[in-house]
Image: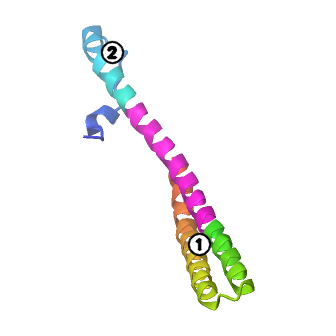
């Protein structure tokens, strides 16, 4: 189970008159605090990686658009209209993928920014 039980988030006055209770609960509280911190740190790292991966995906699609556009130009210069047509379609396909990814990731960027503020 990745989430902590509700009672670990309840604030407890550890400076009460009965110190024996404090000694018994010290280790479990420290253990669950470390577990919660590790879980938070993993999510922060994951958010960072996802942000980079979204950027890399868009850049990859734009790079493929450029590469296929160059293939199209070369094919047309060599008078190979079939090859040029195929390369043009590939370039257009990657262009559309880049546009769709940028639009989809723009919405997700806003969600990630809001989650990162917590």
Q: Nearer the viewer, residue 5 or 106?
A: 106
Look at the numbered discs 1 and 2 and tell me whether their residues touch, using CB distance below 8 Å.
no
* Colour style of the rendered protein structure: rainbow
- At label 2, counting other C-alpha atoms closer than 10 Å, the crowd grade (few under 14, some 14-19, many 20 or more) is few
Q: Which residue is mark 2?
A: 16
Q: Secondary structure at mark 1?
A: helix
* Magenta span includes 58: yes
Instruction: Please identify, in this view, whether the residue under mark 1 or under mark 2 is nearer the observer.
Output: 1
Find residue 86 and name its label. none
Taking the spot 29% from the left edge, 9% from the top edge, the residue there is 19
Taking the spot 51% from the left edge, 60% from the top edge, the residue there is 111
Q: Which residues are magenta?
A: 36-61
Q: Secondary structure at mark 2?
A: loop
Q: Position of residue 8 (x, y in %)?
A: 30, 32
Q: Which residue is mark 1?
A: 98
Quadrant of the drawing holding the N terminus: top left
- At label 1, counting other C-alpha atoms closer than 10 Å, the crowd grade (few under 14, some 14-19, many 20 or more) is many
Q: Position of residue 56 (x, y in %)?
A: 59, 57
Q: Nearer the viewer, residue 17 or 40?
A: 40
Q: Nearer the viewer, residue 63 or 49?
A: 63
Q: Is residue 86 above or below residue 9?
A: below
Q: Looking at the image, is mark 1 or mark 2 earlier in the sequence?
A: 2
Taking the spot 35% from the left edge, 30% from the top edge, the residue there is 35
Determine which quarter of the picture holds residue 100: bottom right
Q: Position of residue 60 (x, y in %)?
A: 60, 63
What secondary structure do most residues of the magenta stretch adopt?
helix
């Amino acid at each position: 189970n990745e989430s902590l039980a509700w009672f670990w988030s309840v604030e407890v006055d550890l400076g009460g008159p009965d110190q024996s209770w404090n000694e018994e609960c010290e280790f479990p509280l420290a253990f669950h605090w470390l577990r919660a911190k590790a879980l938070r740190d993993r999510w922060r790292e994951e958010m960072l990686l996802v942000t980079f991966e979204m950027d890399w995906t868009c850049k990859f699609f734009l790079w493929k658009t450029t590469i296929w556009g160059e293939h199209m130009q070369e094919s047309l210069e060599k008078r190979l209209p079939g090859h040029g047509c195929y390369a043009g379609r590939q370039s257009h396909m990657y262009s559309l993928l880049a546009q769709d990814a940028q639009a989809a990731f723009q919405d997700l960027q806003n969600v990630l920014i809001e989650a990162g503020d917590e």
